[in-house]
Amino acid sequence: MSGDWPLWEVFVRAKAGLAHRHVGSVHAPDAQLALRHARDTYTRRTEGVSLWVVPSAEIVASDPDEAGPMFEPAADKIYRHPTFYDIPDEVKHI
Amino acid sequence: MASLPPIDVPKGATGAGAFDAPAAGEPDPARFDYLLRLGDDSLILGQRLGEWCGHAPALEVDLSLANLALDLIGQATHLLGAAGDADRLAFHRDVLDFRNCLLVEQPNGDFGRTMARQLLFSTWQHLLYQRLSESTDQFLREIAAKAVKEVAYHRELASEWTVRLGDGTEESAQRMREGLDWCWRFIPELFEVDELLDGLITRGIAADPGSFADEYRSALGAVLADAKLETPADQRPILGGRRGHHSEHLGHLLAQMQFLPRTYPDAKW
């Protein structure tokens, strides 16, 4: 039966202030039940305070065959990392 | 088999009413019975839902039903634990001593009937627990305040499935109708006020189901209207669960549920 249902990607916000993170997917006949299934599958152990579900078919993904041109040129651009600054000890979460 | 813990009936506690309330520290048989009613409702429905484990129409639904079952068994653990030794009450009590309503012991049938049973029970339990969270009994107040959120979710889930099945395909609507027809005759028992319950209502311990009977009917009516289903005609009510008069189904359920602890009383996890 679930084979007939579309797939939904599930995102969970672990606590207020954090971004939603992708945790997996569920089958469901519609958006509301996708939220219910996501709740029952991925937040059973108090993993979250907020849920997003997105139809998997709506995800636009990069082509794995294009990974070279897409991502490798960034590898030798160390000056793009903010590692040339002295960060004061008081500044957290960087 | 004498399986219930012995109860000393306090002097002067045979009638109903505030003046008959047992003094602090004295056994309170009416409260004990009420804890069994509430606890057994949750325990038996939890066991029934657990039977779906591995058999639900989809993996996700399997998890949904298991979650409901675990919520209910958690409630039963607290409620029976307040009445005595929860494990002894659950596993070493005979069918005539169970005080659950007949609705929760009904077999699962198909998914439509399971959802019909859930809709009828969770809607009732939600309205009841809302009121119990204002009980004069501190334990009941606290357990109800905690459980009411779980039950609100059960009610919403059952309502959503009722709408999807009722307003789905011809077959799903037919199965939902049959499920509702099967369960409908067990509604009046949920609103029965016997002498024992009447006394507890007077003392402010129990909630009066009569106070939300209309709300219950209109809430069900609204869900069924969304589901494009007609409200079933009232049937001859079947009562007796609160007095231990159960259908044959409960005996089979208990045989399965109690087999292990009764056969191997010393078994440990």
Image (tube, coloured by chain):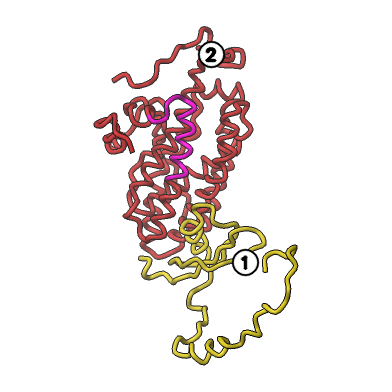
Chain colours: A yellow, B red
Residue B81 drawn in magenta: yes
User: Which residue type does callout 2 highlight?
Assistant: Glu
Q: Position of residue B160 (x, y in %)?
A: 50, 57
Q: Position of residue B117 (x, y in %)?
A: 42, 46
Instruction: Identify the chain of the residue marked 1, using the numbered disc in the image.
Output: A
Q: Is residue B3 above or below residue A16?
A: above
* Residue B48 seen anywhere in this rendered image of the structure: yes
**Residue B26 shows which numbered tag?**
2
The quadrant of the image that shows the N terminus of chain B is: top left
Instruction: State yes or no: discs 1 and 2 in contact (Cβ < 8 Å).
Output: no
**Res. B250 image quadrant:** top left
Span shown in magenta: B70-87
Q: Main secondary structure of the magenta part?
A: helix
Q: Position of residue B203 (x, y in %)?
A: 60, 21
Callout 1: 10 Å neighbours few (<14), some, many (20+)?
few
* Residue B227 seen anywhere in this rendered image of the structure: no
Q: In this view, does B91 lie to the left or right of A75?
A: left
Say if labels 1 and 2 share a chain.
no
The residue that disc 1 covers is A19
Of residues B240 and A60, the one nearer the viewer is A60
Of residues A38 and B40, the one nearer the viewer is A38
How far apart marks 1 and 2 lie (CA) works out to: 55 Å
Residue B210 drawn in magenta: no
Of residues B152 and B115, the one nearer the viewer is B152
Q: In this view, does A75 lie above or below B179?
A: below
Q: Which residue is drawn at 43% across and 40% down?
A: B73
User: Which residue type does callout 1 highlight?
Assistant: Ala
User: Is disc 2 placed on a helix, strand or loop?
Assistant: loop
